[in-house]
Amino acid sequence: MAEKNQPTIEDLKAPLLAAVGAADLALATVNEIVATLRERAEEARTDANTRVGENCLIRSGTRIKESVIGNNVEVRDNCTIRDSEVGNGCTLGPMAHLRGHAVMVDESKVGNFVELKKTRLGRGSKASHLTYLGDATIGENTNIGAGTITCNYDGKNKHETHIGDNVKIGSDTMLVAPVKVGHGAATGAGSVVTKDVEAGKLVVGAPARAIKTVE
């Protein structure tokens, strides 16, 4: 006989039946039960202050807190979104991190192991791999190459990076803030940008220097 306030067998069976969806627990194998419960435990979690739009796909392991998610958004596995805004038609992750009032404008993309902190990513722009963008504004249809870092902290103060429209930032570019990259400009792979880049110019090297006008 069960002690007072102790769960009975029927009490324990009820959530299992609901999770597995079996008419009788005996019809479900142990592996099916474990797999189903694990999937439920890994489902995306949102808090009461988060708004999620229509036709969104939010994969397991994702945590969303005090944020706004637009319509037709895909958030892939194991992303963290805090105090941020994601526009319509955006794609995030897997393993992406938005914080500090980051904003993804419509149709932009943040890929695996990319972090946005206090950054605005413009419409149609992409940062697809292994990137940190902090205290930055990025214009429309700009591509941020893998390994790019906005070097926003000088040991005492945070500084801003401003990148224009239709810019191509090469892989492993270091953008040493404060710095501006003009519309249509480009950086070569491995560039260390310490000075403003004029619109339409290609810069390469460490420190980066202009070598030609982008065609």
Image (cartoon, rainbow, N blue to C red):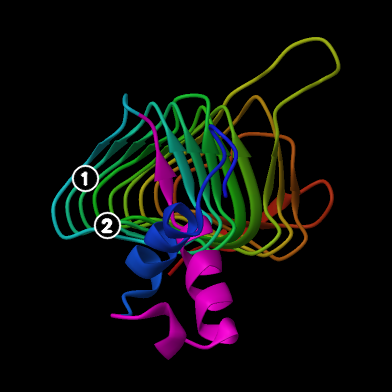
Amino acid at dot 2:
Val
Q: How crowded is mark 2: few (under 14 residues within 10 Å), some or many (20 or more)?
A: many
C-alpha separation, residue under disc 1 versus residue under disc 2: 6 Å
Query: What residue is drawn where x is 40% and y is 47%?
Result: 183
Query: Nearest the camera: 185 or 47?
Result: 47
**Against 164, is 72 above or below?**
below
Query: Nearest the camera: 55 or 44?
Result: 44
Query: What residue is drawn where x is 68% and y is 34%?
Result: 195
- Residue picked out by circle 2: 73
Query: Nearest the camera: 17 or 47?
Result: 17
Whether the magenta-drawn stretch holds residue 39 is answered as yes
Label 2 near label 1: C-beta < 8 Å? Answer: yes
Whether the magenta-drawn stretch holds residue 33 is answered as yes
Query: What residue is drawn where x is 82% and y is 20%?
Result: 154
Which corner quadrant holds the C terminus?
Answer: bottom left
Q: What stretch is highlighted in magenta?
A: 23-47
The answer to whether one can see residue 92 in this image is: no
Q: Which residue lies furthest to the top in this view?
A: 156
Residue 47 percent across, percent down from the top left: 38, 31
Secondary structure beneath dot 2 equals loop
Query: Nearest the camera: 50 or 112?
Result: 50
Residue 123 percent across, percent down from the top left: 28, 50
**Against 21, is 7 above or below?**
above
The reply, left or right, for residue 67 in relation to residue 40 is left
The reply, left or right, for residue 89 in relation to residue 138 is left
Secondary structure beneath dot 1 equals loop
Query: What residue is drawn where x is 49% and y is 56%?
Result: 12
Residue 70 image label: 1
Residue 9 percent across, percent down from the top left: 50, 59
Dominant SS in magenta:
helix
